[in-house]
Amino acid sequence: MPGASRHTNSSPPSRPSTTSPFRWSARSATQISCSSTSTPPETSKSRDERRMRIDARKADWLNVREAVERVVAAVPELDSEEKPIREAARRVLATDLVAPVDVPRWTNSAMDGFAVRSRDVEGASAEAPVELPVVDDIPAGGFPRSALPARAAARVMTGAPVPEGADSVIRVEHTDGGSDVGNQRGRVRIFDRQDAGRNLRKRGEDLREGSIAIGRGSIMTPGAIGVAASLGRATLPVVRAPLVALLTSGDELVEVDRFEEVIAGRKIVSSNSYTLRTQLEDAGCSVRYLGIAADTKESLREALQGARGCDALVTSAGISVGEHDHVKTVLEELQTDFHFWRVRIRPGSPFAFGTVGDLGGIPWFGLPGNPVSSMVTFEILARPALLRMAGHTNLFPATVRAHLEQDVAAQQGLTQFVRVQLTPDGEGGWTARTTGPQGSGILRSLAEADGLLIVPDQEGPVPAGANLPVIPLDPTWRMLIPNVSY
């Protein structure tokens, strides 16, 4: 995903960025026309048109850029909610956070040492130390007894307020540590004046009362959470995390607790149920898992009722042209406006997107059933839309450039996302090599991959040594590597 943009004034945050590795246009997603999520009265003509749109012979075959633009344009940003600060991490701030007080509240010491007036330590050196009486001892959490008189010092701990009149803290390493004489605070010998005028954290140097501490649209990173806590915020207004219904389908699928049927050669585990749930949670979504539906219209109808009250629906499988692919048909019954079907992407071309009228107009992401196709289309086509719903403005994955270790096949008319491993090239860059066979059912190719190599549509292979963009798959990479336009 991806670093957090920070808005430090009260102007509205920027529209979702369409900067991406896919040469998308620079126009705002809000300028792209899209179908309304409301459901107008249906006529026999509109029913026929809908049937035509979901017919396999009427595939849209959008390129990747067009598909992502349409998806992002069609989804709304969700409303806000107040969350306890401990539950607000990685969420998007819905309103500006204004400092109610100066931070820090008082001028305090940045070191353990002795607060002094800088003019009183002029000429201090190891050969000619300056000796001052210690008139106060201020621990962290304590306060000065009085202002600091001339030609005197006050012992202070890190974070403790410095007395009025002091303009420096001499770190303890540049002194003899001070000495106590009976009930007196003693004296201190200062051997170096390099700290004169230094080691103070001045009142309000971090934040001034009334200033915007964190702008709306900012991601609540650990640092932002710390700032909010320092301002006394026990709760924070954040954009609501999308609640996403997840449904897989297929008579051949079982959950992991029925693995004996896999051993017996009758079934396969629904790995998509687990990979997609992990991807959704990684994107900041809450997940309502609807289970595995059988390849019947009745089973799909019943399962999809569980999506009521959700903000989005993700299905896996059942959207291609097979005799038992019923998902689109059942969604048609639910007054779905099919925005498009099929994308010029490999793996994962049978991707569909629409809005489901009978489920409140929520967006539907119809992912392919093959495991690799499902994961890749989620990353490229679904994740940006879900991030927009959660209030993010940087929607698109970060990229790095890498030189190919071997020739990579390309295909005219299809943008390919090849699973690769990245290794440093010794010159500050990266080398990419494929993880092996790239079949859409070889899930291990993703488990072993560091990223997705973006292979443009062209005739003939891309030769070894070519420099292409790679989308890192690890979420840590997405946060640390800036988004680059190609």
Image (cartoon, rainbow, N blue to C red):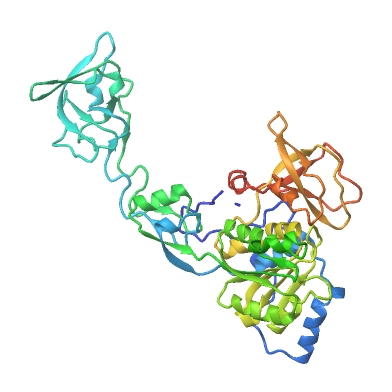
Which residue of the protein is positioned furthest toward the bottom in this rendering? 44
Is 396 on the left or on the right of 455, as rendered? left
Query: Which residue is depicted at the point 27% across and 8% down?
Result: 127
**Location of residue 410 with respect to 157 vertically, above or below:** below
Where is residue 103 drawn, in percent x and y? 33, 46
Work out whether 36 lies above or below 396: below
What is the quadrant of residue 364 in the picture? bottom right
Q: Residue furthest left?
A: 183
Residue 263 occupies quadrant: bottom right
Instruction: Look at 71% across and 84% down and name the residue there.
Output: 333
Q: Position of residue 277 (x, y in %)?
A: 62, 61
Residue furthest toward the right?
460
Q: Is residue 16 visible?
A: no
Residue 480: x, y in percent? 59, 44
Q: x, y (%) of residue 114?
A: 24, 26
Please say whether residue 467 is visible from this viewpoint.
yes
In the image: residue 109, left or right of residue 469: left
Along the horizontal axis of the image, is 397 left or right of 418? left
Q: Quadrant of residue 190?
A: top left
Q: What residue is at 61 percent from the left and 63 percent from the top?
A: 386
> How many marks on residues?
0
**In this view, 106 is above or below 300:** above
Q: Residue furthest top?
A: 127
Quick one: 15 or 225, which is closer to the camera? 225
167 or 257, nearer to the observer: 257
Q: Is residue 119 above or below residue 41?
A: above
